[in-house]
Image (tube, rainbow, N blue to C red):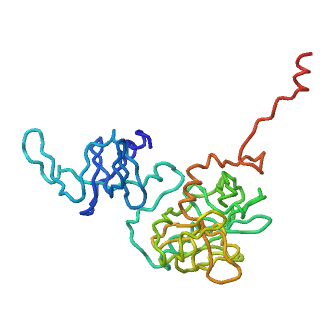
């Protein structure tokens, strides 16, 4: 992690309350980070802030205060004790991935859990149906500019893509189809694709925050919204069966939430309303055996989307290659 990133992060830190057992790392520019210190290395400090882990260079650290010790107020140079208003306070950090990417936002977990009914009303507009000449799937918006995630296998071999969005207008749902859809990036092996709606008259879209699959506990309730068998805006609920199911060398979230063809590419939510996975497959021989790509893999794909960039003139490969020089043309130039 670069010093520039840490300083930018410090500039975005807001003051807040700290748990009595949290460690405090005071940074330059009167900023601080609170969390649990996992490792105090020679050149850096590794801090768990609850939703992510930060690696802070020692060159940016002014002081480290253990959570087991009381935080004493600073004494000014004049020898007078500072008032509570001017004493050192810990901070709540903005999630690192939200600063790095700029394409998506990370949940803060400050809102508390809600019931599925309220979350469906709140989040349903951000879940879309992805249609191609060969079939259909689901997806969800990452930001208001029309960037959305779906599965690679939903759009595999297709360039004619349309997105159906259900806008809420005065309590009513209005279906609208957008046909100017660009493939931004795709990763066949992770089964992920990033699309963008480019219709000129497209509005600002409702979008969803990305959470952490690692933070889930087995048995925790989750739910999905999608279009199984073309039945749009279908909601199914279940629990997390395991978060370490290995299939084909990758780890998936396994859930009892019903997943069927058409759900592919749709979001799997926790009760905070955050996307913790992208549903992509099920075992057809049984029931309640659905799987989702963990949000950590989704964030890795988005943060490194340039490596998976799609080129329209080379649809079978995400990379663009220059044509080699032609020996015939070279000979003609010599004559």
Q: Going by the image, does 78 lie left or right of 171? A: left
Observer-nearest of 214 and 40: 40
For image coordinates 15% across by 53% down, the residue present is: 72
Q: Tell me: residue 173, above or below residue 32.
A: below
Name the outermost residue toward the bottom: 287
Q: In the image, is 231 to the left or to the right of 126?
A: right
Q: How many numbered marks have been drawn onto this rendered protein structure?
A: 0
- Please say if 171 is above or below 30: below
Outermost residue, front direction?
A: 42
Q: Residue furthest toward the top? A: 335
Q: Quadrant of residue 11?
A: top left
For image coordinates 27% across by 44% down, the residue present is: 30
**Image quarter in which the N terminus is found:** top left
Q: Position of residue 187 (x, y in %)?
A: 67, 55
Give 53 or 265, whichever is nearer the viewer: 53
Q: Tell me what residue is drawn at x 29 percent, y 46 percent.
A: 31
Position of residue 212 measured from the top left corner of the image (x, y, whole percent): 48, 64
Left or right of 107 in this view: 174? right
Q: Which part of the image, by quadrant, shows the C terminus?
A: top right
Tell me if 248 is positioned left or right of 117 in this view: right
Residue 196: give x, y in percent of width and height: 64, 55
Where is residue 235 shown, x and y percent of the image?
59, 78
């Amino acid at each position: 992690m670069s010093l520039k990133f840490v300083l930018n992060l410090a500039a975005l830190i807001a003051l807040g309350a700290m748990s009595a057992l949290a460690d405090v790392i005071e940074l330059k520019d009167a900023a601080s980070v609170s969390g649990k210190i996992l490792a105090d290395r020679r050149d850096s400090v590794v801090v768990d802030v609850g939703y992510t882990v930060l690696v802070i260079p020692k060159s940016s650290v002014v002081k480290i205060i253990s959570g087991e010790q009381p935080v004493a107020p600073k004494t000014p140079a004049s020898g007078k004790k500072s008032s509570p208003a001017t004493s050192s306070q810990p901070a709540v950090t903005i999630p690192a991935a939200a600063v790095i990417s700029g394409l998506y936002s990370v949940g803060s977990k400050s809102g508390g859990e809600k019931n599925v009914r309220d979350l469906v009303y709140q989040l349903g507009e951000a879940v879309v149906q992805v249609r191609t000449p060969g079939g259909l799937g689901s997806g969800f918006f990452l930001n208001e500019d029309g960037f959305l995630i779906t599965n690679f296998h939903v759009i595999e071999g297709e360039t004619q893509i349309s997105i159906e969005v259900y806008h809420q207008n005065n309590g009513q749902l209005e279906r609208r189809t957008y046909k100017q859809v660009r493939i931004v990036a795709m990763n066949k092996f992770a089964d992920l694709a990033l699309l963008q709606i480019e219709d000129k008259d497209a509005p600002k879209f409702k979008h969803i925050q990305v959470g952490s699959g690692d933070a889930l506990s087995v048995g925790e309730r989750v739910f999905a919204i999608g279009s199984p068998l073309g039945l749009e805006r279908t909601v199914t609920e279940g629990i997390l069966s395991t978060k370490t199911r290995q299939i084909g060398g990758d780890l998936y979230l396994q859930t009892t939430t019903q997943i069927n063809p058409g759900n592919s590419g749709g979001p799997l939510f926790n009760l905070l309303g955050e996307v913790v996975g992208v549903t992509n497959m099920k075992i057809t021989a049984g029931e309640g055996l659905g799987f989702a790509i963990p949000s950590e893999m989704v964030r890795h794909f988005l943060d490194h989307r340039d490596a998976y960039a799609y080129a329209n003139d080379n649809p079978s490969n995400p990379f663009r290659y220059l044509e080699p020089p032609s020996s015939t043309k070279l000979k003609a130039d010599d004559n």
